[in-house]
Image (cartoon, rainbow, N blue to C red):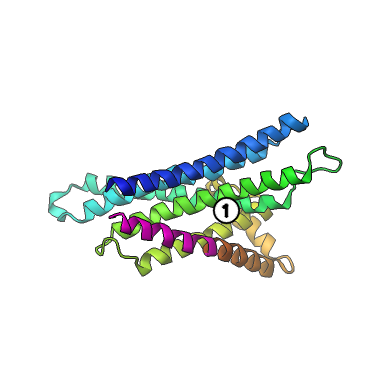
Amino acid sequence: MPQSVAVTILLAAAAVLLLDVYAVVLVVLRAVVYRVRLYRPMLLNVGLSFAPVPLSLAAGIGFTLFVHYRSHPLESASVLEGVLAVMALAVPTCAWLLMFPNSVYLITELNFSHRVEGTPVPLWYDIVQTLALTLSGIANAILSLAALQVFVIVGQQNGNQLTVESWVFAGVVILLGAVGVYLGRYLRFNSWDVRHPASMARKLWSHLRERGKPVEAVGFVMTHAILVALLYVPLFLLAWTSLVAAGL
């Protein structure tokens, strides 16, 4: 990888991390300066929001190892190597996909549910704090998805050419992310609740049987997915153009 490309990627990651830190600082300062209770759920949400970033890098490395294994003749690779290559791709990718909605979930923090009547915290402070929190989540989502899309593109035969497959991959992830946000906000599901699929299915079926819920769910998912896509696509194209110009 050319040095200029590595520097570009590191600068993007540093900018996203700085935004995460700024969001955390504002949450903590809110409690310290205005002497109100520290809203710990926001701190937890920032941590969960950042989790897809390292997971995407692990998944990308796993994808690279898998592509390397597939590029060799079968007789030159053992069954164990094949299993390890599949596991190196599947485990971090599944973990990343489960955690990805935690990033875009921060959009829903804009409902200001943490404010209570009579709070001494000025509205302008909560606006900046919550907006920083939301933007950090979106930035984490865009960075982690972009990293994996780059790995998908580079791992294909046509090298540094944008492919339909990579865009389909990004589109499906964005859509699933919006579904995850809906499940988290309205049914209070967490990523780790997939350990109980039968219970999740029963709660979801019961929820969608309520009058108007299916239409609400579709509207919620589509509006959130379109918003993320409108942010992601131009930013990814801009970053990709810069990487190609730098000699990816």
* Dominant secondary structure, magenta: helix
Name the residue rendered at 65%, 40% in the picture. 42
Residue type at mark 1: give it.
Val
Question: In this orientation, does residue 75 appear?
Answer: yes
Camera-side residue of 159 and 25: 25
Image: magenta residue range: 230-248
- Mark 1 residue element: helix
Q: Quadrant of the C terminus?
A: bottom left
Where 201 falls versus 116 (above or below)? below
Query: Would you name the residue on which mark 1 appears?
Result: 104
Camera-side residue of 60 and 231: 231
Name the residue rendered at 54%, 57% in the picture. 177
Q: Position of residue 72 (x, y in %)?
A: 17, 54
Residue 88 belongs to magenta span:
no
Residue 241 belongs to magenta span:
yes
Query: Relative to 117, is 1 on the left or the right?
Result: left
